[in-house]
Amino acid sequence: MSRRPLEIAANSVASALAAQEGGADRVELCENLGDGGCTPSYGTIALARERLRIPLYVLIRPRAGDFLYDALERDVMLRDIESCVRLGCDGVVIGALADDGSVDEAVCRELIAAAGALGITFHRAFDVARDQAQALEAVISLGCERVLTSGARSTAPEGADTIAALVRQADRRIRVMAGAGISEHNLAGLVTRSGADEFHASAKVIRSSRMQLVGKAIAGLDAQWLQSDADRVRALRAALDAV
């Protein structure tokens, strides 16, 4: 069997480089992972592009919350995509829903047109769509390469049976990438149950500051942060290759 692709959701340049070192096949660059991820800064994208040898996809999401975007937010996403094109990124990760919970095909087509020749992944807006079967057909009609999904559950292992149904429905018309709550410990079971084409994880660990903070604790100014770890990426890669 050919190698199953492993994508790492990297919330910084350091995380992206750890993903590459650990054997990831692709990076999805973002920030604010705690809220599901948002678009990273221009500087983050530019430096990641300079340093990475593996494909770089950038999350295009202007804020946390829902996926119903107004005209101003659409303009922000278009500008961000234009930056990704100029910087030579390999792809972007998009998604938008209408107020009835269906895929907003008009907005998505506008974003895809701005991306030009870049690859397109449809993100986990898919998981909160009103009907996943209908949403999958819409995403396929948009011409996306892949859809990221947890099977409309909090984690991909919980949604494995739904992911398997989506893989059958997709019938090779689009790649189904399982993501959310994936670790080296549950990956083998997820591969077997879901039959997904690709897998997506953050491989994150807690990093602690070396600063002497003199015991101060201020909300929002924490001495710890999350960062992808090369050893955890290696463990994921090994688990995926062992199935």
Image (spheres, helix red, strand yellow):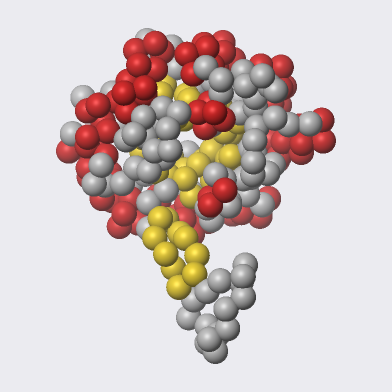
* Relative height, residue 235 to residue 76 (above, below): below
Which quadrant holds the N terminus? top left
| Residue plotted at (47% across, 45% down) | 9
- Left or right: where 199 falls relative to 133: left
Could you tell me residue 75's position as x and y percent?
A: 79, 34
Whether residue 94 appears in this view of the structure is yes
Which quadrant holds the C terminus? top left
| Residue plotted at (36% across, 38% down) | 6
| Residue plotted at (57% across, 13% down) | 138
- Left or right: where 1 falls relative to 20: left
Could you tell me residue 175's position as x and y percent?
A: 41, 21
* Relative height, residue 44 to residue 129 (above, below): below
Could you tell me residue 239's position as x and y percent?
A: 22, 42
Task: Report the residue that reaches farthest toward the left.
Answer: 242
Q: Give 8 or 96, whichever is nearer the viewer.
A: 96
- Left or right: where 237 falls relative to 145: left
Looking at the rendered structure, the number of numbered marks drawn on it comes to 0
Task: Report the residue that reaches farthest toward the right.
Answer: 72
Q: Give 223 or 108, whichever is nearer the viewer.
A: 223
Q: Give 58 or 131, whichever is nearer the viewer.
A: 131
Instruction: Give the image quarter of residue 237.
Output: top left
Whether residue 200 appears in this view of the structure is no
Could you tell me residue 222's position as x and y percent?
A: 56, 71
| Residue plotted at (64% across, 44% down) | 64
- Left or right: where 204 falls relative to 68: left
